[in-house]
Image (tube, rainbow, N blue to C red):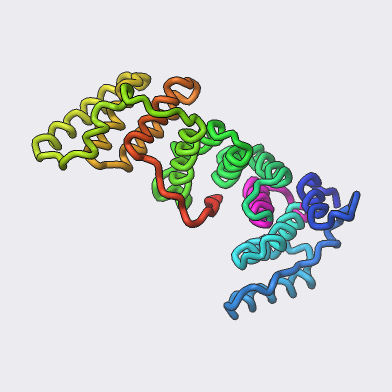
Amino acid sequence: MVILFPAVAVGFYLILNPAQQSVDVEPSTYEPKICQTTDDPDLRALADKLVDALREKPGDVKGWELLAKTNFSLGCYIESAETYAALIDLDKPTGERLASLGEAIVLTNDGVVTDWALAAFNEALVMDATSPMARYYVGLRRIQQGETRQALEIWLDLLEESTKDAPYFAMLDEQIQLGLSQLAADVNTPLDQDKKSPGSDRLTTDPLSEHERVSQNNEIDKLIAHLNNEPTNFEGWQRLVQSYAVLGQKESARAALREAVMLFMTDPQKMQRLMDISQELELQPQLPEVDTAPDSE
């Protein structure tokens, strides 16, 4: 059978078998396998049945797909990647399969987006330009290459197109905050006291009175209305972020900051100012304990 995606299928085989200089992969050479890492007897029984069924019927595409997903769920990332490669060879590449293959390769390599993983994600995006998983990992590759601004462009676009109930939304949002913090650290410019944001010192004073809160909320409403009509007004975005922060609404302040970053990403001076504001108003997030990937759906 003609290999439909040799770059990834063969490439991953060579990663697992570095002594091989070249290889001619045929579907029949793929051996369905699963690792022994689960204490769940039901899941183990299902996995064993899948392997047995595929040995009897190696052309069962749905069986290979289910085995690839089962391996991934078990944390058997090497086996999952091998199975996705076999599936692509046996049937055809799709955006979801290529993205899943790439993710399994990443997790096999301790979270590093290798060249082979990137090839899988790029091919996935050719087939499905909206793939959240592929876009996330392409951004992660940029971060790992020290290209924080480019990563943020990818992730901010993805966040803008995503709904808040998407399974990956919270994780993506947190990664963006980390990226903004990294961008601020990369700039590494001491804060100029003369450039401190009006209202940033207000965060360290006594709580707002009810009258002040009402006044601040009215100011926010006016700013939002103004920015809807004039979205490139940089001063307006600064004031909106600061106004949210004064009210103690840090999540809203971060959301406004992200929107401003999207608008002014190509302007180094404005980006410097936004990073200063992020530091002044203490909008940097805590480091997450886990770093997982979004689902493709």
Instruction: Measuring from the top left, give residue 123's x and y in whole percent.
Output: 69, 41
* Percent coordinates x, y for residue 180 in the rendering: 46, 36
Q: Nearer the viewer, residue 59 or 276?
A: 276
At x 71% / y 63%, what residue is drawn? 79
The residue lying furthest to the left in this view is 211
Taking the image as shown, residue 67 lies to the left or right of residue 186, namely right
Give the tally of numbered discs: 0
Q: Nearer the viewer, residue 2 or 278?
A: 278
Majority SS type along the magenta span:
helix
Q: Position of residue 58 (x, y in %)?
A: 79, 65
**Where does the image place residue 8, in percent across and percent down from the top left?**
76, 47
Image-quadrant location for residue 222? top left
- Front residue of 18/194: it is 194
Residue shown at the point (71%, 48%) measured from the top left: 93
Residue 53 visible? The answer is yes
Q: Quadrant of residue 237?
A: top left
Does 102 appear in magenta?
Answer: yes
Q: Which residues are magenta?
A: 89-108
232 sits left or right of 11 in the view: left
Residue 161 shows in this picture: no
Q: Residue at x 74, y 52 (%)?
A: 88
Instruction: Indicate whether 55 appears above or below 276.
Output: below
